[in-house]
Amino acid sequence: MFSLRDTLEEEQIEERTSIEGLYWIRNYFVETTERSRIVLPNPGQGNFSIVYHAADFSDAPHGGYDIYGIHLGQVDVLTFLAADERVMKGHFVDCRRGSPTLHRAVTLEFKGTPERALVIDRGIAHIFDNLIGMVTVNQLKKYRDFANPDFNSSVDVYNVPRGTAPSDFPVLQVNRFEARQWLCRFVNKTQRMALRKQETWSHHPIALKAGQSKLTLTKLEQN
Protein backbone atom coordinates (compact mmCIF):
# COMPACT_ATOMS: atom_id res chain seq x y z
CA MET A 1 0.00 0.00 0.00
CA PHE A 2 1.37 3.43 -0.95
CA SER A 3 1.78 6.01 1.79
CA LEU A 4 2.80 9.65 1.61
CA ARG A 5 5.40 8.78 4.25
CA ASP A 6 7.14 6.68 1.60
CA THR A 7 7.82 9.82 -0.42
CA LEU A 8 10.63 11.76 1.21
CA GLU A 9 11.07 15.43 0.41
CA GLU A 10 14.32 17.27 0.73
CA GLU A 11 15.05 20.97 0.73
CA GLN A 12 16.14 22.27 -2.65
CA ILE A 13 19.19 24.38 -1.86
CA GLU A 14 19.64 27.33 -4.21
CA GLU A 15 22.64 29.09 -2.69
CA ARG A 16 25.13 28.20 0.03
CA THR A 17 27.33 30.48 2.13
CA SER A 18 30.72 30.00 3.77
CA ILE A 19 28.97 28.98 7.02
CA GLU A 20 27.58 25.45 6.90
CA GLY A 21 23.93 25.59 7.92
CA LEU A 22 23.35 29.09 6.48
CA TYR A 23 21.83 28.84 3.00
CA TRP A 24 18.91 29.74 0.73
CA ILE A 25 16.27 27.19 -0.29
CA ARG A 26 13.55 27.22 -2.92
CA ASN A 27 10.01 28.07 -1.81
CA TYR A 28 7.07 26.28 -3.38
CA PHE A 29 4.46 28.74 -4.64
CA VAL A 30 1.55 29.37 -6.98
CA GLU A 31 1.97 32.37 -9.29
CA THR A 32 -1.15 34.56 -9.19
CA THR A 33 0.19 37.60 -11.07
CA GLU A 34 3.55 38.53 -12.52
CA ARG A 35 4.88 39.32 -9.03
CA SER A 36 2.27 37.95 -6.61
CA ARG A 37 2.57 34.46 -5.11
CA ILE A 38 0.77 32.00 -2.83
CA VAL A 39 3.59 30.41 -0.83
CA LEU A 40 3.17 26.78 0.23
CA PRO A 41 4.78 25.18 3.32
CA ASN A 42 8.29 23.87 2.86
CA PRO A 43 9.18 20.19 3.48
CA GLY A 44 9.42 19.25 7.13
CA GLN A 45 7.76 22.40 8.41
CA GLY A 46 4.96 22.28 10.96
CA ASN A 47 5.33 25.57 12.82
CA PHE A 48 5.41 29.14 11.68
CA SER A 49 5.49 32.67 13.00
CA ILE A 50 4.95 35.99 11.24
CA VAL A 51 6.73 39.22 12.16
CA TYR A 52 5.52 42.58 10.86
CA HIS A 53 8.09 45.36 11.16
CA ALA A 54 6.02 48.55 11.44
CA ALA A 55 7.16 52.16 11.01
CA ASP A 56 8.03 52.42 14.70
CA PHE A 57 10.08 49.21 14.68
CA SER A 58 13.44 50.99 14.66
CA ASP A 59 14.65 54.59 14.76
CA ALA A 60 18.28 53.60 14.18
CA PRO A 61 20.03 54.49 10.88
CA HIS A 62 20.31 50.78 10.01
CA GLY A 63 16.53 50.28 10.35
CA GLY A 64 16.92 46.93 12.08
CA TYR A 65 17.70 45.21 15.36
CA ASP A 66 20.27 46.35 17.90
CA ILE A 67 21.06 42.84 19.17
CA TYR A 68 21.97 39.56 17.51
CA GLY A 69 19.78 36.57 18.29
CA ILE A 70 21.09 33.01 18.75
CA HIS A 71 18.74 30.00 19.01
CA LEU A 72 19.96 26.64 20.28
CA GLY A 73 16.74 24.69 19.79
CA GLN A 74 15.35 26.33 16.68
CA VAL A 75 16.23 26.47 12.99
CA ASP A 76 14.85 29.63 11.37
CA VAL A 77 13.48 29.33 7.81
CA LEU A 78 12.81 32.95 6.83
CA THR A 79 10.91 34.31 3.85
CA PHE A 80 11.28 38.07 3.50
CA LEU A 81 8.26 39.80 1.96
CA ALA A 82 8.58 43.39 0.73
CA ALA A 83 6.59 45.05 -2.05
CA ASP A 84 9.36 47.53 -2.85
CA GLU A 85 12.86 47.03 -4.25
CA ARG A 86 14.71 47.62 -1.00
CA VAL A 87 18.00 45.86 -0.29
CA MET A 88 18.28 44.27 3.15
CA LYS A 89 21.37 43.05 4.94
CA GLY A 90 21.83 40.09 7.24
CA HIS A 91 24.87 39.69 9.48
CA PHE A 92 25.78 36.25 10.85
CA VAL A 93 28.35 34.76 13.22
CA ASP A 94 28.88 31.03 13.82
CA CYS A 95 28.71 30.34 17.58
CA ARG A 96 28.44 26.52 17.51
CA ARG A 97 30.79 24.60 19.77
CA GLY A 98 32.92 22.27 17.64
CA SER A 99 32.09 23.99 14.35
CA PRO A 100 34.97 24.20 11.82
CA THR A 101 33.83 27.77 11.07
CA LEU A 102 33.47 28.90 14.72
CA HIS A 103 33.21 32.72 14.96
CA ARG A 104 33.29 33.12 11.18
CA ALA A 105 31.28 36.22 10.18
CA VAL A 106 29.19 36.53 6.99
CA THR A 107 27.13 39.43 5.60
CA LEU A 108 24.42 38.84 2.99
CA GLU A 109 22.58 41.43 0.88
CA PHE A 110 19.19 40.52 -0.60
CA LYS A 111 15.78 41.78 -1.69
CA GLY A 112 12.42 40.61 -0.45
CA THR A 113 10.98 37.72 -2.45
CA PRO A 114 8.41 34.96 -1.84
CA GLU A 115 10.36 32.55 -4.04
CA ARG A 116 13.10 31.55 -1.61
CA ALA A 117 13.77 31.28 2.12
CA LEU A 118 16.89 31.73 4.22
CA VAL A 119 17.77 28.83 6.53
CA ILE A 120 19.66 29.76 9.71
CA ASP A 121 20.72 26.70 11.67
CA ARG A 122 20.93 26.46 15.45
CA GLY A 123 23.81 28.35 17.01
CA ILE A 124 24.27 30.91 14.21
CA ALA A 125 23.89 34.47 15.51
CA HIS A 126 21.89 36.72 13.19
CA ILE A 127 20.77 40.33 12.86
CA PHE A 128 19.12 42.23 9.99
CA ASP A 129 19.05 45.79 8.57
CA ASN A 130 16.41 47.79 6.65
CA LEU A 131 13.38 45.85 7.89
CA ILE A 132 10.90 48.70 8.45
CA GLY A 133 7.61 48.10 6.62
CA MET A 134 8.23 44.47 5.68
CA VAL A 135 6.94 41.07 6.79
CA THR A 136 9.02 38.02 7.72
CA VAL A 137 7.49 34.53 7.65
CA ASN A 138 9.41 31.95 9.70
CA GLN A 139 8.67 28.26 9.00
CA LEU A 140 10.82 27.24 11.93
CA LYS A 141 12.01 23.80 13.05
CA LYS A 142 12.23 22.97 16.76
CA TYR A 143 14.94 20.83 18.38
CA ARG A 144 15.20 19.42 21.90
CA ASP A 145 17.95 17.84 23.98
CA PHE A 146 18.00 16.03 27.30
CA ALA A 147 21.55 17.12 28.20
CA ASN A 148 22.37 20.61 26.95
CA PRO A 149 23.48 22.93 29.78
CA ASP A 150 23.33 25.95 27.46
CA PHE A 151 19.66 25.50 26.50
CA ASN A 152 16.82 27.29 28.27
CA SER A 153 13.47 25.87 27.14
CA SER A 154 11.61 28.95 28.41
CA VAL A 155 13.76 31.48 26.54
CA ASP A 156 15.57 29.97 23.56
CA VAL A 157 17.55 33.03 22.58
CA TYR A 158 20.96 34.42 23.50
CA ASN A 159 21.49 38.07 22.64
CA VAL A 160 24.73 39.81 21.68
CA PRO A 161 24.95 43.60 21.13
CA ARG A 162 25.43 44.91 17.62
CA GLY A 163 29.06 45.86 17.01
CA THR A 164 30.54 43.01 19.08
CA ALA A 165 33.69 41.54 17.53
CA PRO A 166 33.08 37.99 16.16
CA SER A 167 35.82 36.59 18.41
CA ASP A 168 33.89 37.85 21.45
CA PHE A 169 30.68 35.98 20.60
CA PRO A 170 29.81 33.06 22.93
CA VAL A 171 30.53 29.41 22.15
CA LEU A 172 27.33 27.40 22.63
CA GLN A 173 26.08 23.83 22.37
CA VAL A 174 23.05 23.33 20.10
CA ASN A 175 20.23 20.86 20.63
CA ARG A 176 20.58 17.60 18.70
CA PHE A 177 17.12 16.04 18.28
CA GLU A 178 14.27 17.33 16.13
CA ALA A 179 11.17 17.86 18.27
CA ARG A 180 8.07 15.76 17.68
CA GLN A 181 5.09 17.55 16.19
CA TRP A 182 2.92 17.02 19.27
CA LEU A 183 5.48 18.88 21.38
CA CYS A 184 5.58 21.77 18.93
CA ARG A 185 1.78 22.00 19.01
CA PHE A 186 1.84 21.92 22.82
CA VAL A 187 4.29 24.83 22.97
CA ASN A 188 2.11 26.85 20.59
CA LYS A 189 -0.97 26.09 22.69
CA THR A 190 0.65 27.26 25.93
CA GLN A 191 1.58 30.55 24.24
CA ARG A 192 -2.01 31.07 23.05
CA MET A 193 -3.30 30.27 26.54
CA ALA A 194 -1.02 32.94 28.03
CA LEU A 195 -2.33 35.48 25.51
CA ARG A 196 -5.94 34.58 26.34
CA LYS A 197 -5.13 35.47 29.95
CA GLN A 198 -3.94 38.86 28.67
CA GLU A 199 -0.35 38.18 29.63
CA THR A 200 2.01 40.01 27.29
CA TRP A 201 5.77 40.35 27.11
CA SER A 202 6.76 43.98 26.63
CA HIS A 203 10.03 43.07 24.91
CA HIS A 204 11.97 40.07 23.69
CA PRO A 205 13.59 38.10 26.55
CA ILE A 206 17.36 38.34 26.87
CA ALA A 207 19.58 35.44 27.97
CA LEU A 208 23.19 36.01 28.99
CA LYS A 209 25.89 33.44 29.70
CA ALA A 210 29.14 33.92 31.61
CA GLY A 211 31.15 30.78 32.33
CA GLN A 212 28.80 28.22 33.82
CA SER A 213 26.28 30.83 34.98
CA LYS A 214 23.18 31.81 33.01
CA LEU A 215 20.94 34.82 33.54
CA THR A 216 17.59 35.35 31.84
CA LEU A 217 16.00 38.80 31.79
CA THR A 218 12.28 39.00 31.08
CA LYS A 219 9.60 41.56 31.77
CA LEU A 220 6.09 40.20 32.11
CA GLU A 221 3.22 42.67 32.27
CA GLN A 222 -0.26 41.77 33.48
CA ASN A 223 -2.96 43.81 31.72
Image (tube, rainbow, N blue to C red):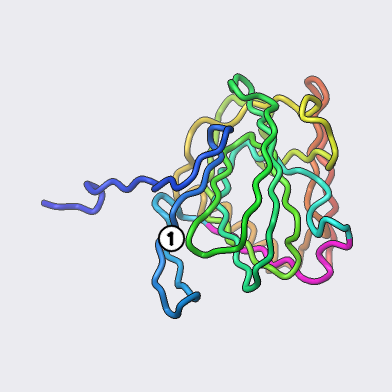
As drawn, 105 above or below 147: below
Say left or right for 30 vs 76: left
In the image, residue 223 sits, relative to residue 138, either above or below, namely below
Q: For this rendering, which residue is in front, 34 or 137?
A: 34
The amino acid sitting under disc 1 is Pro
Q: Which residue is mark 1?
A: 41
**Image location of residue 183, percent across then percent down:** 50, 47
Q: Nearer the viewer, residue 92 or 9?
A: 92
x 46%, y 73%: residue:
37
Residue at the location (45% across, 67% down)? 39
For the C terminus, give its image quadrant.
Answer: bottom right
Dominant SS type (magenta): loop
Left or right of residue 29: residue 70: right
The segment highlighted magenta reads 48-59
Element marked by disc 1: loop
Query: Percent from the top left, x then y, of residue 120?
Result: 58, 43
The location of residue 180, given as percent across then percent down, is 45, 44
**Going by the image, does 172 lie left or right of 65?**
left
Asked whether 87 falls inside the magenta stretch, the response is: no
